[in-house]
Every structure is written in C-alpha cells, then in structure tokens.
Amino acid sequence: MFLVNLMKVEEAELIQLRTVYDELWRDAKTMIKDMRRSIMIYAYSGSISAIIGVYSLISAILYSLAIITGDTSLLNYFYAVFDAFASVAITLFSIKLLKWHSELKRRYSKLIEMEKTIED
C-alpha cells in the first residue's frame, strides 16, 4: 500500500516536471535572449557608474581646490566631502557590477552559444 502511494506521488511529480520542461523547451530561445540582455545590463550599469564615479572624483577635487584657493563657502566643504565619499562608493559599486557581469557571462557562455543552434 505504501509503495503504491509512493509511486502515485512520484508519478504526479514527474507529470509536473514534464510540464515545466515542456514550457522551458518552448521558451528556451526567448529566455536565453532575455538572459543575455540582462547580463549586458550589468556591463552598461557598471560602465555608467564608473563614469559617474570619475565625475564625482573630479568634482571633489575642484571643490577642494576652491577651498584651498580661499573660497571657504560652507557648501564647498559639503560638496568636497560628499563628492569624495560618492566617488568612492560609486566606483566600488561599478567594480561590483562589472564583476557580476563577468561572472554571469562566464557562467552562461555555453547556454548563450547554444542559442544560435536552437530553432524558432
């Protein structure tokens, strides 16, 4: 009796898995394209973040130079400190995004290559 119930449970699970596999097979090419685009978003976001980080660093340097040359406005102190912090934070974030892009691209490279062989 126990074995019969166990076999019914296993059969039900196999039917569910078959449904999932059928759905994956139908949408495989679209899913791979979506995955490839999602991976590229990490590259774009990381690159844009790096550019913003460099801009923030330049801005912090310019505000620091303004302070050194005698413009002791309170806003200059605030901007110099804020931009220095922001440049470090954004640069670290961009490095992390680019690292994730590299890892995902490496991890799914075979799958992305297989996209070319899948028929529509």
Image: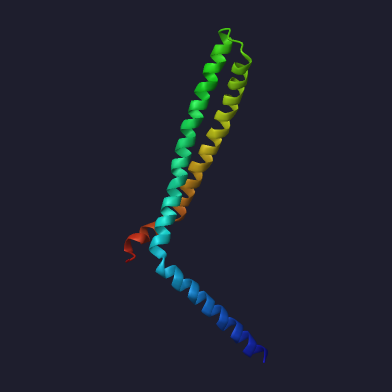
Taking depth in this image into account, of 42 and 71 the one nearest to the observer is 71
Q: Position of residue 108 (x, y in %)?
A: 44, 56
Q: Residue at x 57, y 81 (%)?
A: 12
In this picture, is 5 found above or below 111? below
Q: Write the residue at 48% across / 39% down.
A: 46
Judge whether 80 appears above or below 51 on screen: above
Task: Judge from the rendering whether residue 109 lies leftward or rightward of residue 86; answer left or right.
Answer: left
- x and y, in percent, of residue 29 in the image: 38, 62
Q: Is residue 9 above or below residue 78?
A: below
Residue 92 to residue 78: above or below: below
**Residue 89 in sight here:** yes
Q: Is residue 116 left or right of residue 69?
A: left
Quadrant of the rendered image containing residue 4: bottom right
- Residue sticking out furthest to the right: 2
The answer to whether residue 105 of the structure is visible from this angle is no
* Residue drawn at x 49%, y 75% as measured from the top left: 19
Could you tell me which quadrant the N terminus lies in?
Answer: bottom right
Residue 118 coordinates in the image, percent (x, y): 34, 65
* Count of marks overlaid on the render: 0
Q: How is this picture coloured?
A: rainbow
Q: Is residue 76 left or right of residue 99?
A: right
Residue shown at the point (54%, 34%) measured from the top left: 90
Viewport quadrant of the C terminus: bottom left
Front residue of 5/80: it is 80
Residue most extreme to the top? 70
Q: Position of residue 43 (x, y in %)?
A: 44, 43
